Image (cartoon, rainbow, N blue to C red):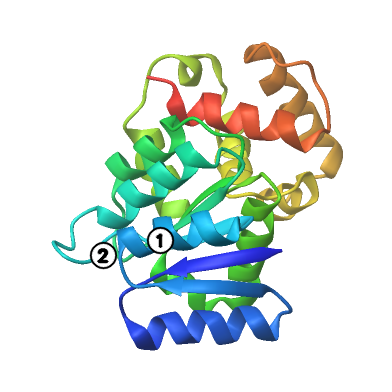
């Protein structure tokens, strides 16, 4: 796995590099701003870009804009956005962006959960999703029609956990139910979303995206 990082805070950036390299991840380049991110993505063709939303010079959304442009140029690039706050408008833009690579949006405080952070990195680099629970909750509360209207409360809960990147076994543990019950919910969700029931990871990603993009 080849990773690039765009983060203007040197201490955090070096901390991420050290954490990833200790876990055997190949961090091939670093940048401090959006232009730098585009350069290193073009030069190194990484599997994943880990990007802070707010980068110089204005510290608003330069990181997100650069990540979306990098994804446009390299559709298979996975993008894991880090933010200090829940900013659902940015998450929505990331979800709506074209591309084949995985997508993730985590609060920076989650980096402290090293195992969880590394799992998110692996999922997004592999084409999956990793969305912070606080982000998922805000997105879901902002959408009350469309797909959500067809899902039962239990199916909603399963979808929220699926959006965080949990497997069926992980969802079962979180909901304190048997894996078989989760499989039935997942099958029902796939049917309601017109996705053939399957254990294929790509189907799960499509289901999550359809769920979170629904209005």
Q: Are marks 1 and 2 in contact (CB under 8 Å)?
A: yes
Do we see residue 163 in this rendering? Answer: yes
- Going 74% across and 79% down the picture, which residue do you hit? 24
Mark 2 = which residue?
Answer: 55
Mark sitting earlier along the chain (1/2): 1
Q: Is 163 left or right of 197, judged from the image as shown?
A: left
Query: Relative to the observer, which residue lies in front, 181 or 203?
Result: 203
Q: How many marks?
A: 2
- Going 38% across and 88% down the picture, which residue do you hit? 11
State the image coordinates of residue 199 (x, y, percent, origin top left): 83, 33
Residue 37 tag number = 1
State the image coordinates of residue 6 (x, y, percent, origin top left): 41, 67
- Local secondary structure at mark 2: loop
- Going 60% across and 77% down the picture, which residue do you hit? 114
Query: Relative to the observer, which residue lies in front, 212 or 185?
Result: 212
State the image coordinates of residue 177 (x, y, percent, origin top left): 76, 46
Q: Is residue 10 above or below residue 113?
A: below
């Amino acid at each position: 796995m080849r990773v690039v990082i765009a983060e203007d805070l040197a201490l955090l950036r070096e901390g991420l590099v050290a954490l990833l390299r200790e876990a055997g991840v190949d961090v091939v380049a670093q940048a401090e701003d959006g232009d730098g991110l585009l350069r290193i993505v073009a030069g190194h063709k990484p599997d994943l870009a880990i990007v802070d939303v707010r980068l110089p010079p204005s510290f608003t959304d330069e990181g997100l804009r650069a990540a979306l442009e990098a994804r446009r140029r390299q559709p298979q690039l996975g993008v894991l956005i880090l933010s200090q706050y829940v900013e659902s408008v940015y998450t929505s833009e990331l979800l709506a962006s074209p591309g084949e690579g995985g997508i993730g949006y985590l609060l920076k405080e989650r980096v402290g959960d090293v195992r969880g952070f590394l799992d998110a990195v692996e999922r997004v680099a592999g084409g999956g999703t990793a969305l912070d629970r606080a982000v998922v909750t805000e997105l879901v509360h902002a959408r009350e029609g469309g797909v959500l209207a067809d899902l039962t409360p239990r199916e909603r809960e399963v979808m929220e956990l699926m959006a965080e990147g949990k497997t069926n076994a992980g969802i079962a543990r979180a909901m304190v139910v048997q894996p078989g019950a989760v499989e039935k919910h997942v099958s029902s969700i796939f049917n309601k979303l017109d996705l053939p029931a399957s254990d294929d990871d790509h189907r799960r990603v499509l289901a999550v995206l359809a769920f979170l993009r629904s209005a």
